[in-house]
Image: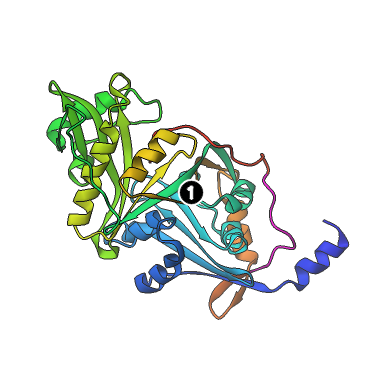
Amino acid sequence: MTDALQQRAVGAPLIPIRQLRDRRRLEALLNGDRAFAAYALGHLEPGPFELSQFWVADAPSGTGVVLVSDAIGATLITSGDANAVAAILSLHPGPRLAYLSTAAPEHMGAIRRWHHVDDPLTMRRMSVSRGAFTPVDSSTTNAIARRLSDADIRSINALYALDDRSGQYSGHQINNAVYFGAFIDDELVAIAGTHVVSPMIAMGVVGNVLTHPTFRGRGLATYVTSRVTSTLFTMGCEQVVLTADPENTPAVRAYGRLGYEVGAPVVEARLRRRDPVGLGAWWRRMKAEHIQGFEAVRAAPHPPRPAEGAPEAGKGRTG
């Protein structure tokens, strides 16, 4: 760093960083783009909330939020102003291994400074309101759809095994979410489920949409997504969100027929913290200035730059 940049850093304003546990204040901070922040909003529900930490920073350019959660595996979510997000991550970079389920493209410079980023996917958030939703029926699919339960777990895992990015699901996971499957001759050939069901904030997130390769092009994914979306609205949700690959034009069009509209870009990735022990973050916290009980760091003299290049658009299963 040059002397000029050093002087700018020393004279830069302080960015206060605090952990926030007030649900109403957190929801207000995340309400700017509810579709983008759907995963973070879902963590305000009882259960996930107790397993989550929300860090908030107020930079001169705006407010940022970083969520670290163990509710469904180790998860990192970033939202809001990029400079504020960078300030939080400098002190609280998150777990050693985590899944980045939501970040804006402009957050990736700060994330890459503290993490190795693997398998990045640049997706698009899509959302639909209760009033805009247009359900479809099964008249053109020759399939029977029903809600799935733990009794279907073998068929569910057999179908998801066809997707390289899928893992094994438990009956508990299926029973505590909303999953619908389409059957042809008693074979499960398409499925859609949920990542978030949050009546408290009137938000649902559809995900894990997959169709057996042999049965694609028949509208089955659209149909099961329609059934899941409809069920979320009957459960009290006012907005339902999903994440789609923008290069998968047929999927984007299919969701559009249900009333889903394309929104903000979202980056997902697997993260490995560069400092596996966490001593660097601990030392930075020890050295941080303290004002009014908050940790505080100096505003960066310039935006952080990606260490490994920008994330590339990827092709993966929706959600």
Relative to residue 258, is residue 63 depicted above or below? Answer: below
Q: Quadrant of residue 219?
A: top left
Check the image and name the residue furthest to the right.
3
Q: Quadrant of the C terminus?
A: top left
Relative to residue 15, is residue 308 depicted above or below? Answer: above
- List x then y, in percent, for residue 152: 15, 31
The local secondary structure at tag 1 comes to: loop
Q: Is residue 146 left or right of residue 118?
A: left
- List x then y, in percent, for residue 167: 34, 31
Way the structure is coloured: rainbow
Q: Quadrant of residue 61?
A: bottom right
Q: Label 1 is placed on what type of residue?
A: Pro
Residue at image position (26%, 31%) is 220
Q: Is residue 147 left or right of residue 22?
A: left
Check the image and name the residue furthest to the top.
214
- List x then y, in percent, for residue 106: 60, 53
Whether residue 29 is visible here, answered yes or no, is yes
Check the image and name the residue furthest to the bottom.
292
Residue at image position (22%, 55%) is 233
Whether residue 318 is visible here, answered yes or no, is no
Residue at image position (64%, 50%) is 109
Mark 1: few/some/many CA within 10 Å (<14, 14-19, 20+)? many
Name the residue beneath numbered marker 1: 95
Q: Quadrant of the N terminus?
A: bottom right
Q: Is residue 312 magenta?
A: no
Q: Is residue 300 magenta?
A: yes
Judged by its main secondary structure, the magenta piece is loop
Q: Quadrant of residue 161?
A: top left
- List x then y, in percent, for residue 99: 45, 43
**Residue numbers of the magenta segment:** 297-306
Q: Is residue 85 left or right of residue 254?
A: right
Residue closer to the observer: 169 or 142: 142
